[in-house]
Amino acid sequence: MQQLIRGRVLDFFADPAETDRNHRYHEDGAILIQDGRILAVGDHADLARDGLPEIDHRPHLILPGFIDPHIHFPQLQVIASWGAQLLDWLNTYTFPAEAEFADPAHAARMAGLFLDQLVAHGTTTAVAFCSSHRTSAEALFTAAQARDMAMVAGKVMMDRNAIPAVHDTAQSSYDDSKALIETWHGRGRQRYAITPRFAITSTPGQLAAAGALAAEHPDCHVQTHLSENRDEIAYTLSLYPQARDYLDIYETHGLLGPKTLLGHSIHLEPREIARMAETGSRAVFCPTSNLFLGSGLFDEQGLRAAGIVSGIATDVGGGTSWSMLTTLNEGYKVLQMRGQKLHPLAAFHWATRGNALALGLETEIGTLAPGSAADLVVLDPRATPAMALRAERARSLAEELFILQIMGDDRAVAQTYVSGRAMKTA
Ligand code: GUN
Ligand code: ZN
């Protein structure tokens, strides 16, 4: 069955930070959908025909659904935990909360609620760290598959320096990850990410097991954390005294490459930046988290100039909002502190096609090109009285987008489509 979704349609085919010819915009536009895929995008007048079911979202904007390339599934009740920086925050709040995901009933309940929050905020694909328990990844994949929602996820591998309830072993983490890959990677819209949490919580033996998995499954992503916090870096280097630097630990265990997502990547040495560029490894900027945990200011321009592709993500629950709009807002402010500018067109490109490029999934998600999944977000730049008041003076599409970027959150998400189905109930 075909259907038409009508509104002010916007997507990107190039990065506005790099070229002025970068987006397609149809003021009275429409997206033709069949079986969860986009068949065509254009002016409404060219696509409408008698008998074709149509949903009219005018005057709202319709974009590809947001992609969140770094979020922690078992931290949905950790968000807004007071007073700590990274290592204390992990020990005090995070590891105890993640321990509860050993219980399949808890994990299943939380998985549904996790996906509900993503959809409420207009996010249609996430790259998620699960807990160390296989059950947590099973629960998330099962719930995402039932919604036909594209997830990239993996159970964290962590065999030291936390609490016993969240420890696995090098062997069990290898076996559980392998079993999850066999069951879930490439099943429907699900993909597996090999997920050593970070060097502090993995023995060298476990990082070797992660590297073996990456070599055996080169089409899986790898996700971990890198150089988020000064104390983290010092502790890490004390645990791996032979390493040239933090990145070298991941490099010597075969964990770098274009499918590798390195969360935070803030306090980098020149050699690390060069090796990230040479290996094609991705950096992921998590602005609300970096501010909340007092971690530091990401250098977007510096990494771009070095040739590194970056994503932008929430990092819930170190991050303080599920909203990619709020994330773009805080990202704008972090870059202001660095003397860098995040233009609204570049911001909306980043949260959609840019993050898809960071994942290497740009033919599947992140644009409205025919053949892509019909994953869409419908945005209302006048969602609140304060936004509507500001929008009275908006003179361009870029100004409207900037209102969404700076003032928007889930209230501005009028609807979210996943595989062509409206997911948001009033
Ligand atoms: N480094 C290792 N684990 C985590 C985590 O759960 N959140 C953040 N922000 N950093 C980490
Ligand atoms: Zn994280």
Image: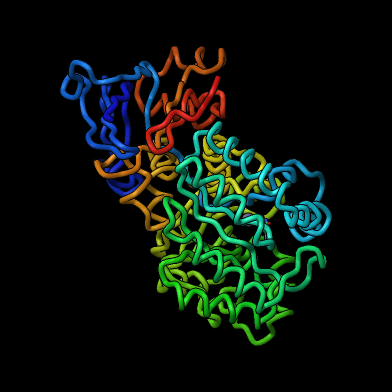
Give the tally of numbered discs: 0
Residue at point 56%, 54% (across, down): 298
The residue lying toward the viewer, choosing from 60 and 237, is 60
The image quadrant that residue 336 belongs to is top right
Q: Is residue 374 visible?
A: yes
Say if 141 sits above or below 185 in the image: above
The residue lying toward the viewer, choosing from 102 and 170, is 102
Q: Position of residue 196 (x, y in %)?
A: 61, 68
- Colouring: rainbow
Tell which residue pokes out farthest to the left in this image: 46
What is the quadrant of the N terminus in the image? top left
* Horizontal relation, residue 131 to residue 178: left or right: right
* Horizontal relation, residue 330 to residue 359: left or right: right
Tell which residue pokes out farthest to the bottom in this image: 242
Say if 60 sits above or below 225 in the image: above
- Taking the image in four quarters, ligand 2 sits in the one at bottom right
Residue at point 56%, 68% (across, down): 179
The image quadrant that residue 197 belongs to is bottom right
Q: Position of residue 203 (x, y in %)?
A: 69, 79
The residue lying toward the viewer, choosing from 27 and 168, is 168
The residue lying toward the viewer, choosing from 337 and 182, is 182
Q: Is residue 285 visible?
A: no
Q: Position of residue 166 (x, y in %)?
A: 76, 63
What is the quadrant of the C terminus in the image? top right
* Horizontal relation, residue 318 to residue 185: left or right: right
Q: Position of residue 207 (x, y in %)?
A: 61, 77
